[in-house]
Image (cartoon, grey):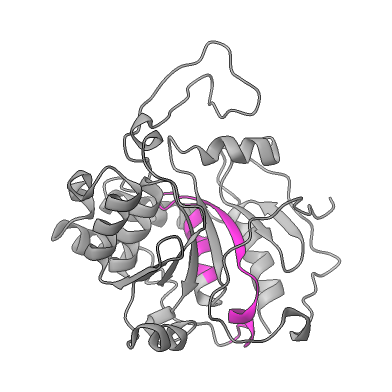
Amino acid sequence: VRFARPASALRAPAHTRCSIVASSLPKLTVPDNFVVPEPKPLSVPEGQVVSALTGSLALAFRLGSGVFVHGWTPGFVLTPKEGEYNLFRFRDTSPALEACKRPEKPLLLYEYEASPYCRKVREVCGMLDLTVTMLPCPGARAGFAQELQGKGGKMTVPYLEDPNTGRGMYESDDIINYLFDEYGPGRDEAPWLVREPFALWSCAFSALARGLKGGSRDARARPENEQREPVELWGYEGSPFVRPVRERLCELALPHTIVYCPRGSTNRDRMVQLTGRFQVPYLRDPNTGVSLFESDSIVEYLNTVYMT
């Protein structure tokens, strides 16, 4: 199976990474024996049963938050249209979000996987069907944490930067209010699942269920990872299969643009048009030209390419 090279990868907006041109970075190589797997929808990858169970437990602690877009509306289509997502003619949408403003450029979020405050912000990004470039700050001290301190004066996550409005802010509750005001139906419509005190404790238990993975930078990660082009990840916060990929991206301090596609997302149609199917996680890497499905294979790929 040959590596798939994306025809038109999403390009994240420029951010203040180190001013090193891509051509000066060490060349990335993919081993000749690495094979892109065939997608296996509706199945648990071999050896991933425990991971899927702990990921499902983490989702249970959050009562399914992040699985659906805001205003999720189920439906049924008699004659499916080409290029539109449906599962056995079941098609879900969100009329509520159709009337909301859509950002032209991806938002930037300084965060890390194990932080309960970051998780609830990520869930809201999925609820509002946004595309967000993640700048991992493992433990709020590694990765992009120094860059964040230069911008906002402190290494505290989450920190949101919106290139569409020029706004930047700390504090998870302020970020959630801003996102619902700017790209949703207003802060009063934000669900109680992302409000305190439930959100903090349930997000913390979710992180514990996964062993606090994604909370520190792997000592074996390539030192120049932060300077790479953001890889593109399609998925959503509630998926137990997307979780291991997200954790590894944070541990490797790799910038990555998440195209959120929870239930009811219009991005599901985009994926069908792009790949001919809907399945997450799906990774596209502009640094190597590789595209692949299957969480275990994606993690293997990341370890092979982005570790010393």
| Residue 174 lies within the magenta run | no
Answer left or right for 75 relative to 225: left
Q: Residue at the location (30% across, 59% down)?
A: 120
The answer to whether one can see residue 154 in this image is: yes
Instruction: Please identify the residue farthest to the front as the structure is shown.
Output: 165
Q: Residue at the location (48% across, 67% down)?
A: 134
Residue 221: x, y in percent?
A: 60, 82
- The quadrant where residue 228 appears: bottom right
In the depicted structure, whether residue 85 falls above or below residue 65: above
Say which of 257 and 208 sits in front. 257
Residue 48: x, y in percent?
A: 54, 55
Which quadrant of the figure contains the C terminus? bottom right
Instruction: Please identify the residue farthest to the top as the structure is shown.
Output: 78
Say which of 294 and 162 sits in front. 162
Residue 11: x, y in percent?
A: 63, 61
Residue 103: x, y in percent?
A: 46, 52
Residue range in magenta is 220-249
| Residue 243 lies within the magenta run | yes
Say which of 115 and 135 sits in front. 135
Answer left or right for 120 relative to 29: left
In the depicted structure, whether residue 167 falls above or below residue 130: below
Q: Residue at the location (68% across, 41% down)?
A: 274
In the depicted structure, whether residue 70 falls above or below residue 61: above
